[in-house]
Each structure stands twice: as structure tokens, then as C-alpha cells.
Image: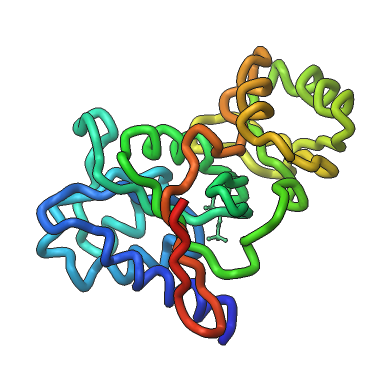
Amino acid sequence: MTQDELKALVGQAALQYVNPGEVVGVGTGSTVDKFIDALVTIKDSVPGAVSSSNRSTDRLRAHGIRVLDAGEVSKLAVYIDGADEIDGRGFMIKGGGAALTREKIVADLAERFVCIADESKLVQTLGAFPLPVEVIAMAVPQVIRRFEALGGQAQVRSGVITDNGHPIVDVRGLSITDPLGMETEVNQWPGVVTVGIFARHRARVCLLGTAAGVKTLNF
Ligand code: 5RP
């Protein structure tokens, strides 16, 4: 199976976590695009979605699915999103699509984060994928220096400004053995809007697309 077919497989499998009559949280990315396409088939039982990006909002609306503002709900039963990396504890790196801040905001509303990913995303230790960090422009040089002091190589993602109007810094060369500790530390740095480590908002379930079908990991 191709990577695209594996993404479609887990996008479809995620429907089982969507409760009829309940608003669903929707992430961002090529895997989530497949989920949104699958969601159309049950859209009459879904009152709406809270979206984590302009990209997903556009796709949801194009499919006739109502999009609510995050402020219109106080909680969500489930948030469904992809990941750039996920480890055996449900900790993730996210933000490859530059939507990490809104993804964390919507994930925070949800009781359960269901990650959908093809098997290439499952890793022992986070960090081979460059860690995305959304940063207020004025703080970028200092944030880069701080990552360099930790042994990383950080650079601004060329040509990308987030839905919130900020640049993204990508950090290579980190081995993130303590995701919770690093998320907590980087969150303290002035000018950091969001670090793409999802440890506090880790996945509770991962639907992993494999050649043998969908494997469900519970954390
Ligand atoms: C976007 C994200 C995505 O979930 C992540 O990049 C995975 O994307 P894809 O499903 O296209 O591989 O965090 O900010």
C-alpha cells in the first residue's frame, strides 16, 4: 500500500471515534484531509467541527460540514489529528503543516486525542523530524540561540507564516528523551507561541496505518 492509501485507511478508521450528535475537533494535514473526506459520509449525524487551521476549515466547508469557532464550545469528546512523529507513549511532534498553535488549542478542548498516522510516523525517540516552534518574529534570534545551546540547529522555515501571523523555527538535531520536560522548558522562553511537542496534550489513541491494516495503540 502507498503512504497515501495508508492515510486514507486511518482517516476512514477514525470515523468510529466520532460520536453521533457531537461536535468533533479536526486537526490539519494530508492525513486529516482523508479524515475530512470520510467525515462527509456521516455528515448528517455530525452537527459541526472545530477546526485547527484555515486549510481544514476550507475543506470542511467545501464538503458542507459546519465549522464552529473554538469559543462556541466548552469541551469536545474527541480531537482527531495527524502527527509528524509519535512515540510509544503517545507523545508527538507536530507542526509540519505550521498549524501547531491552533492544533494545541483545539486539542486542549478535547477529552481524547486520537492520532491518525501511517506507520512511518512511529518512532522510539522524538527528534529526527525537525521540531517546529511558532515564535513571535522579534524573539526569533534569541530562540535560535537557546536551541543552539541545547545542541540543536535551528532555522526559520522559509516562506511560511502561520494562520496567526508568526514565523516557524524548525530545530534539527534534537533527541527528545524527556518530551514533557522539554515542552515545559521551551514554553517558558519569551516569544515562543507554541512548541510542537505534544506531551501535555499527548494522544490517547493512535490509529496506525500498516501494510497489515489499521493497528490501534492505546496509551
Ligand atoms: C500540521 C501537523 C500535521 O498533523 C502533521 O504535519 C502531519 O501531517 P500529515 O498528515 O500531512 O503527514 O501537525 O501542523
Q: Nearer the viewer, residue 53 or 130?
A: 130
Tell me, yes or no, if residue 136 can be seen here: no
Residue 156 placement, left or right of 167:
right
Nearer-the-camera pick, 112 or 83: 112
Please report the residue visible at 27 percent of the width from the left and 56 percent of the height from the top: 61
Is residue 34 positioned above or below 103 on the image? below
Where in the figure is residue 16, as x and y percent of width and height?
A: 26, 66
Please report the residue visible at 65 percent of the width from the left and 68 percent of the height from the top.
120
In this rendering, position of residue 15 left or right of residue 91: left
Q: In terms of image quadrants, where is residue 75?
A: top left
Quadrant where the N terminus lies? bottom right
Please give the name of the residue rendered at 25% of the width and 40% of the height, measured from the top-left corner. 76
Of 211 and 164, nearer the camera is 211
**Location of ligand 1 given as a quarter of the image:** bottom right
Q: Position of residue 102 (x, y in %)?
A: 44, 36
Picture coordinates of residue 5, whole percent (x, y): 50, 81
Q: Residue 105 vs residue 189: left or right?
A: left
**Quadrant of res 190:** top right
203 or 219: nearer the viewer: 219
Q: Position of residue 108 (x, y in %)?
A: 38, 33
Residue at 43%, 77% in the rendered image: 9
